[in-house]
Amino acid sequence: MANPYPQVYFGDRIVDAGEASVGVGSSAVLYGLSVYTVFPVHVDGSARTAFRLDDHFRRLEESCKIIGIDRFAAEWDFARFRPAVIDLIAANAPTEDVFVRATVHVVESIPGTRVRGCAIKVSIFVYDAMPIVPQDGMRLKSSPWRRIPDNAIPSRAKVNGAYVNSVLAKQDAIDSGYDDCVFLDGNGHVCELSAANIFLVRNGTLITPDVSCDILDGINRRTILTLAAEDGIPVVERTIDLTELYIADEVFVTGTSSGTSPVTEVDGRLIADGRPGPISQTLRKRHTAALRTDIHHGWVTRLF
Ligand code: PMP
């Protein structure tokens, strides 16, 4: 099927998708040395809006800073990023909601593994906003693969190469008949899924691993924490044991490509009665609304 979104921002302009490529000898290809983010763009009549665009850009900057991709801060800022996204959306003219993936590639071909001062190229492309996990109740398997710790490849930075860890764990879960994995750290504490953050509800309190638990600091995780606090739901960020998931009243996940989606089973154990719980459903509705309508947070950016 023809690509419905054939225009790609690459380097400093919009090109046909076939022209946007990085070399086989680049560090991006050889070492997975790229960082990225994915954000949703909502179509509402003739208006196009992006969710938490500035936060996504900031996380891209932070990922570069952590990894040492210093050319990004030298060459890019939000004032350059925003019009690039607007041009891309205008060029592809989506008529349905889409996801946008923005990547900073280290394109220099150099012998050996280093990063500082290396040339970069930014690519931004659009694709269908299809959720990557079931939306009506997913089954998770705790992974035999451990989450990469902050002192190996930091999960806080969204580095392409690090996603081999996610691929191993997700494929193992799929091969075992599950929808996705739950990553644990070296001490057996819960981290996140292959590409989503995790929450549980116990006795009315919302609990999620804190940001020092080898997780990505998800934009939607932050969103849920804000919305829950506004709804008067007590929120705790702390380490979580795997067995706490088994006895939770509710479990759900968040992420751009996952939405806010309920978990109905972990390691063959039903979560409560195996149906999505009330707090998950309320927060899911609030999250869906927040993606579209900027009530008071300044989260929704009108592109045009
Ligand atoms: N954790 C990982 C490992 C991810 O890849 C993602 C998806 N970007 C998330 C969490 C959720 O992050 P966000 O809410 O920013 O999409």
Image: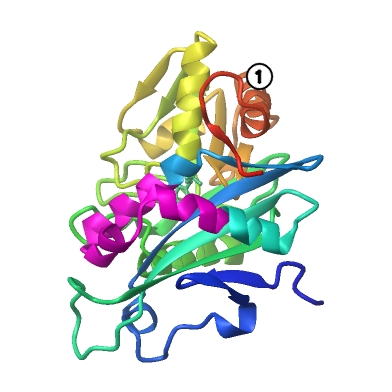
Q: Which residues are magenta?
A: 57-85
- From this view, report whether residue 37 is shown above or below residue 212: below
Q: Position of residue 69 (x, y in %)?
A: 25, 65
Is 71 part of what is drawn in magenta?
A: yes
- From this view, report whether residue 61 is shown above or below residue 206: below
- From this view, report whether residue 211 is shown above or below residue 83: above
Identify the residue shown where x is 67% and y is 33%. 292
Q: Position of residue 135 (x, y in %)?
A: 70, 42
Identify the residue shown where x is 46% and y is 39%. 219
Label 1 sits on residue:
278
Q: Position of residue 179 (x, y in %)?
A: 62, 54
In the foreground, 86 or 290: 86
Identify the residue shown where x is 61% and y is 59%. 87
Examine the image and state in which quarter residue 207 appears.
top left
Identify the residue shown where x is 73% and y is 48%. 97
Q: Callout 1: 10 Å neighbours few (<14), some, many (20+)?
A: few
**Principal secondary structure, stretch drawn in magenta:** helix
Relative to 260, 76 lies left or right: left
Q: Position of residue 284 (x, y in %)?
A: 64, 29
Relative to 78, 204 lies left or right: right
Does the image show residue 198? no
Examine the image and state in which quarter residue 281 appears.
top right
Residue at the far top in the pictured view: 232
Relative to 242, 301 lies left or right: right
Label 1, secondary structure: give it: helix
In the foreground, 134 or 118: 118
- From this view, report whether residue 161 is shown above or below residue 101: below
Examine the image and state in which quarter residue 237 appears.
top left
Dot 1 amino acid type: Pro
Is 260 part of what is drawn in magenta?
A: no
